[in-house]
Amino acid sequence: MLRTDLPKIITDTLPGPKATEIIKRRENVVPSAIRCGYPVVIDRGEGAMIEDVDGNKFLDWIGGVGVLNIGFSQPEVVEAVKAQADKYFHGMFNVVTHEGYVSLAEKLCSIAPVKGTEKKAYFANSGAEADENAVKIAKSFTKRPNIIVFSGAFHGRTHYTMAMTSKKAYAKGMGELANGVFRAQFPYYYRNPEGMPQDAALDYYMKSLTDVFEQCAAADTIAAIVVEPLQGEGGFIPAPIEWVKAVRRLCDDNGILLIADEVQSGFCRTGRMFASMYWEEAGVQPDIIATAKSIAAGVPLSAIVARKEIMEAAAPGTIGGTFCGNPLACAAALKTIEIMERDHLAERSCEIGKKVTERYLAMKEKYNCVGDVRGLGGMIGIEFVKDKETKEPAPELTATVINECAKNGLLVEGAGVYNNVIRFLAPLVITDEQLAAGLDIFEKAVVTAMEG
């Protein structure tokens, strides 16, 4: 059964012959800007496993980039979507009310750790849409034009979120960026300025924020500060709690809303239903949460949640859209959240993260190329360097590790501003045997990359 199988490559080459033919067809009709460096053409997916069209079996530690926290093809979700499809595929929420949308909004309002007692939620289709809508809501509420984002941030590829996203390779050749988006330094403690003591780091990064008020836009023009509780594309860097507390105070002192971008970190990935629950445990909460990815187990859906007074600031007609809150997606999301809570996937995320972190830290002790290991729950990053002392990034070695893993049936993905981090985003339904096999493949790939 694929769901419990281990990785196994049966073709002499990767991609295999059938996959090669399909990839050639892809190249003929799909823009090359939609890149794919993996030799895989999926035929089936179950749990944490992929079987390709040639019969090769891969263990997936990418999970659709954080979309498949409950795994591929979860049978109960499949049945929930089928049951909804038997009734109707679509009913635009601006025209007809459907109960799935209402039930899902009720559920998210009951579990999202945003400030306030009365909350409201609405839906979009992607993470970028959620982030952009969160900013729209913040601007409507504060009547202010500007926002602050951070180095290393990834918020999407729409026109506005391209400006929010730090890495400008994602905006190359796309023309003038949206204005009113200002950037401060994210607290990347592993790469603090050379010679700076750790006890000076908080003040350093907070000054980067307040410098925006002086150099770019006055505090009373800032609608929101947008933070990933754990940066994804930036290198799997958790936002330090002491920094989050300081940012919350800064927001409160200046009438600024705090937005948590939980597109990748939400839905049990970090060991909590939302990563900002760690903030809540420390006594602070965001004003708005934008989330997506694993919300509906692979069906396109995203959500924006905030307290009632913020949500009601939007003028009629300024939010919503044709497919937003599609009935099939809402059915998938309701069943997905039910399974996550019933099967204690947040706790399972912590168990998985503990095992991965222990193995990665052991590798850090053995190999000079492992510079840092960090994360929350089952969202772990391992950073590769040329030398532990200089911390010079090792992007070539990282790329070799990724390729070696794929050759041996393990799919992993890179990240980081220097392209030297590998992220762990395996479905949380991965078996212990699969996890152990994957860790063995991963370590062997690191050794091979070092020797090469």
Image: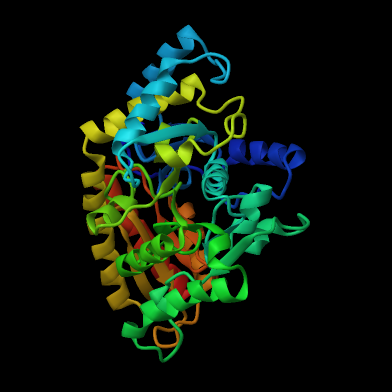
- In depth, the one of 444 and 69 nearer the eye is 69
Where does the image place residue 2, in percent across and percent down from the top left? 36, 33
Q: Is residue 196 above or below residue 326?
A: below
Q: Residue at x 38, y 18 (%)?
A: 80
Q: From the viewer's perspective, tell me whether residue 305 is left or right of residue 96.
A: left
- In depth, the one of 211 and 359 nearer the eye is 211
Q: Residue at x 42, y 32 (%)?
A: 296
Q: Which quadrant holds residue 101?
A: top left
Residue 80 appearing in the image: yes
Q: Residue at x 49, y 63 (%)?
A: 234
Q: From the viewer's perspective, tell me whether residue 76 is left or right of residue 259.
A: left
Where does the image place residue 58, in percent across and percent down from the top left? 43, 44
Q: Which quadrant holds residue 16?
A: top right
Where does the image place residue 70, in percent across and percent down from the top left? 34, 36
- In depth, the one of 62 and 23 nearer the eye is 62
Q: Which quadrant is the N terminus positioned in?
A: top left
